[in-house]
Image: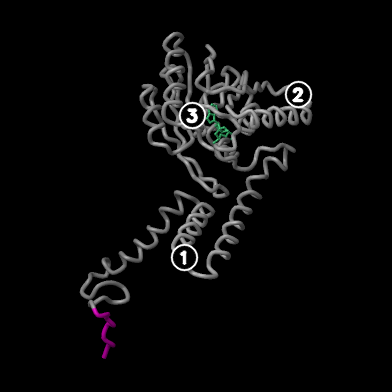
Amino acid sequence: MNAPLQTGPTGESPHGRKGDAPSERVRPARRMVFDFWRPLRRHGPLGLAIRACGLLQKRLNTAPGCRRPLLWLEGVIRGVHRRLDGAFDRQHGTDTSGVVPVENLGVASESLKEAVWYEPMSVKVFRQIMDHLPIAFGEFEFIDFGSGKGRVLLLASARGFKRVTGVEISPQLHRIATQNVAIVERRTGRPSGIETVCLDATAFAIPAAPLVIFFYSPFKGNVMGKVLSNISSSFARNPRDIVLVFYGRNPESIALLKATGFPCRELKLRNDWSRLHQYRSLLFASPEVQGC
Ligand SMILES: C[S@@+](CC[C@H](N)C(=O)[O-])C[C@H]1O[C@@H](n2cnc3c(N)ncnc32)[C@H](O)[C@@H]1O
């Protein structure tokens, strides 16, 4: 005789509720995999581990002996991230890594209310985005709004843009970016075509050339609105090829970008699992740009 199916007090079996069809019984297992997979895809293994540490720290705040190992684990995860992200600097002898919180940007400006902290772009993701642009790079100028320590500028310069400009509000970060550009120019023995400007992005005059404009989530709200309105006015005066690239997640910024009226395309890219945050990559191209 077959052993009776073990049930709990509410009639559940180890595989599902008593009487469930076999497909229903496997659903909780599938859901568990799904519940784990979704945040894993969204945040990546390092990002998810950091979040789990934060959550456990909050939950176990009062449990003696738990806080220290969790802080240690968080330190290890951040160390792994730093090590992986530092590959660019080890290769080029530059200093583009690390996170700088908004309060340490060293500038007193209204715009800082809408600013996002400094964190360098993923090299892997930036290269994939550039591979998706169906344009002749040599005919375009490239602008990075919120250029920080200049990593994106150096990567864009390697693509052969006619000119590369970085606009950064923080004097400290601007100084580091200028040094990084000089280091790479010395090493390669070639001018990079990079110009670094220390300025609030809202005050930057948009050049009247074909443009690729890059936003790695540098600011939001009114500041994003003003910069996009400057771009739209420049385009209205002089319709031309303009590609806006947005790498981030802020829904308000995405809505503002959509309001430019430039058709939008979301890129399906391979995530960079060495990062603590995974973001969306969106292209907004003026109708003049073929194939975007
Ligand atoms: C996420 S980081 C961008 C990193 C950079 N693009 C790179 O090369 O990887 C955002 C940057 O935007 C800068 N930022 C924030 N508000 C700004 C503003 N109003 N004008 C110019 N830069 C700004 C911050 O100082 C920070 O360096």
Q: Which residues are magenta?
A: 1-9
Q: Residue under circle 3?
A: 245
Residue 256 drawn in magenta: no
Label 1 sits on what residue type?
Answer: Leu
User: Which secondary structure, mark 1?
Assistant: loop
Earlier in the chain: of badge 1 and badge 2, it is 1
Give the vertical position of 97 relative to 15 (above or below): above
Image location of residue 223, percent across then percent down? 46, 26
Residue 149 image label: none
Answer with the quadrant where ligand 1 appears in the image: top right
Quarter-of-image position of residue 5: bottom left
Q: Colour scheme used in the picture?
A: one colour
Label 3 sits on what residue type?
Answer: Val
Q: Residue under circle 2?
A: 190
For the N terminus, which image quadrant? Answer: bottom left
Label 2 sits on what residue type?
Answer: Arg
Residue at 45% x, 29% y is 283
User: Which secondary structure, mark 3?
Assistant: strand
Left or right relative to 91: residue 240: left
Q: Residue under circle 1?
A: 60
